[in-house]
Image: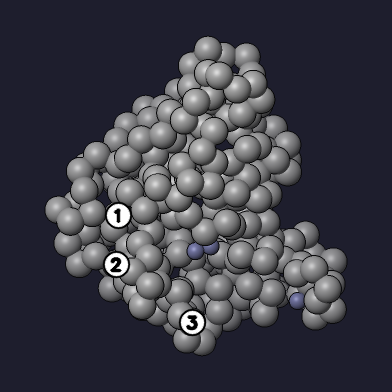
Amino acid sequence: MQVIVLGSGTSTGVPIITCPCKVCTSKDPKDKRYRASLLFQSDKGNVLVDSGPDLREQMLREKINAINGVLYTHFHFDHLDGLPDLRPFTFDTKAELKCYANPQTHEVILTRYPYIRNSAIYSNVPRISLNMYPGDEEKGYRAIEVAGMEFQPIRLVHIPQAGLLSTGFVVNKRFGYLTDFKEINPDDEKYLYNLDILFLGSPIDHPHVSHIQQQEALEIFTRFKVKRGIIGHLSHQYLHSELLTKWHGYAEPAFDGMQITL
Ligand SMILES: [Zn+2]
Ligand SMILES: [Zn+2]
Ligand SMILES: [Zn+2]
């Protein structure tokens, strides 16, 4: 299995439009951060996690010509709103692209993109079959298999005050990806121990209404005894080179184009 970091940035992307700060004007390519998304590759195909607004550029950059399925974490625009750019993946095939989401995300996708329900009667709309993760938010989800890889959904709370949920994944029992969240459902913590890699989203190192802060990410790596911790969904407050030094021995900052082989 291979994992490609398609985007390591927070919702604005980095650089931020109009921002003159040292990170947004940095010449280091590792300080250019597209919106958060990962690609999982096996010898059977590709699975995309989220289709953010930078999807088109990400697919062209990594020369991705086929997708076997898309798993959504939640409905925020930085994770969802490149959805129309999934169209080329079904131009030459009769099959619909299989997408999965939790119930909240499922509902928002159908509200925001109502035409995907009737893709047969439109032309030039994404041909998607939209599914929910098997199981439920109350009792827990069951793993799904896509492109020969097993994805175990992990229940997360993204914005507790708003009741906004998100979904993380543990892939092949080895790689965890929890991006936008404040809380992990305690009943799903059992999936997170002793992973080879845990990739957490944490934009900043001070309290945030909808994300864990970076110090908490470091504590989670220790608590679950993960072998390698990676932090993404990064803001424009930190140079890649600064984070490398700051987290040396504890975690690694994600960067666009980062590849991990397992
Ligand atoms: Zn996000
Ligand atoms: Zn900036
Ligand atoms: Zn979010």
Query: Which part of the image, by quadrant, shows the C terminus?
Result: top left
Q: Which mark is residue 131?
A: none
Mark 1–mark 2 distance (CA, rounded to whole Å):
8 Å
The residue that mark 1 highlights is 154
Instruction: Name the amino acid, label 1.
Output: Ile
Mark 3–mark 2 distance (CA, rounded to whole Å):
16 Å
Q: What x and y, as percent, mark residue 106? A: 39, 45
Q: What x and y, as percent, mark residue 143? A: 26, 40
CB at disc 3 and ligand 3 closer than 8 Å: no
Q: Which mark is residue 184?
A: 2
Q: What x and y, as percent, mark residue 55? A: 65, 44
CB at disc 1 and ligand 3 closer than 8 Å: no
Mark 3–mark 1 distance (CA, rounded to whole Å):
21 Å
Say whether marks 3 and 2 touch (CB < 8 Å): no
SS class, disc 1: strand
In screen coordinates, is 37 left or right of 72? right
Label located before the other in sequence (1 or 2): 1
In screen coordinates, is 142 left or right of 88? left
Location of residue 78 by image quarter: bottom right
Say whether marks 3 and 1 touch (CB < 8 Å): no
Vertically, is 79 above or below 98? below
The residue that mark 3 highlights is 208
Asked whether residue 47 appears in the rendered view, the answer is no
Query: Which residue sits at x=45%, y=74%?
Result: 210
Vertically, is 85 above or below 259? above
Query: Which part of the image, by quadrant, shows the N terminus?
Result: top left
In screen coordinates, is 232 left or right of 30? left
Q: Residues within 10 Å of mark 2 (few under 14, many from 20)?
A: some
SS class, disc 2: strand
